[in-house]
Each structure stands twice: as structure tokens, then as C-alpha cells.
Amino acid sequence: KSASAGREWTEQETLLLLEALEMYKDDWNKVSEHVGSRTQDECILHFLRLPIEDPYLENSNASLGPLAYQPVPFSQSGNPVMSTVAFLASVVDPRVAAAAAKAALEEFSRVREEVPLELVEAHIKKVQEAAKALGKVDPAYGLESSCIAGTAPEEPDKAGE
């Protein structure tokens, strides 16, 4: 059901994402279920990457009229992270918010694949202890229970069901 992270979003998936956000606000479980072909993480990242600049905002003299008094999306959310993001987005220029979101996404993408040093050191210690006890070195020893992403045993493919 989940798509590969590198696959481009279709226009239909983006429309489903926007529709789901209107219906479910920041309930990302329901949003990803509504999109159907994307995980929660993919939905969040795509939402953050969506263009937030409006061509009409380029003319800073343009009046927003009654829209200026509309609440910012997620500002009344029970989710403190989304409330903070909404507040910050409402007080900065859209170009600044876009640049900040881009930098955050780049950093998240870079850090996402890194394994924290503490986990690596703990794993090395487990392997060394197992080598002493068992008399052989098995680098994969204890990986299933290490909570390191990508080390859990793979579930059988359920596509044939």
C-alpha cells in the first residue's frame, strides 16, 4: 500500500491529500488512509513541500479584505507542534517560511538515515559480549531488538493475499 519515497506525487494524490486535510485536519493517520497510496511521513513531507506562496502576495499593497481575519489553519489544533507551526507561519513573510521549510526538509532528509552514535556503540558492545560468550563474531547479533531503522525482520509480502 505504501509507495516508495522517491516516487513523484500524482495530481490525484495531491488533491486527495488536500481533501483529507480539510476533512481530518492534523489526524495524519486518517489523512494517509484517505490518500491511500502514501504513508503518514510521505503525506506530512508532501504537505510541507506544497507551495505556500500565492502569486497575489507578491503585491504587498494588495488588501486581503475579510480574509485577513480568518484563523490560520491548525491554529486551534490540539496538536502543539502544528499550533506552533501555524503561529510561526502567520507572523513571517511566506518566502521566509518557504525557505525555512526547505532548509528543515533538507536537514530532516540528511539526518533521517543516520543512526545515533549511542545506538551504534551499544550494538558494538552487545556484539563483543556475544562474541566472548559464543566464541564467534556475528555483526547482526541483536539487531532485531536494537530499534535501529531497517533492522527488523521483514514481513512477508502480503500482495498475494
Image: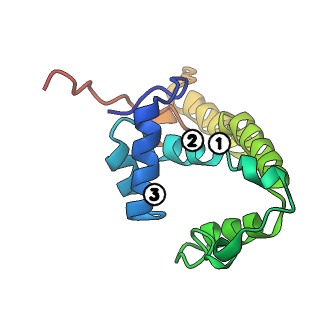
Alpha carbons under labels 3 and 1: distance apart? 14 Å
Front-most of residues 99 and 104: 99
Residue located at (52% from left, 45% from top): 41
Spot occupied by residue 51 in the image (x, y as percentages of width and height):
67, 44
Crowding at mark 2 (Cα within 10 Å: few <14, some 14-19, many 20+): some
Colouring of the image: rainbow
Q: Which quarter of the figure has residue 156?
A: top left
Badge 1 is on which residue? 49
Residue 46's disc is: 2
Badge 3 is on which residue? 21
Quadrant the C terminus occupies:
top left
Secondary structure beneath dot 1 equals helix
Spot occupied by residue 117 in the image (x, y as percentages of width and height):
75, 41
Spot occupied by residue 33 in the image (x, y as percentages of width and height):
33, 48
Residue type indicated by callout 2: His
Alpha carbons under labels 3 and 2: distance apart? 12 Å
Horizontal side of 41 relative to 48 (left or right) equals left
Q: Of marks 3 and 2, which one's residue comes earlier in the chain?
A: 3
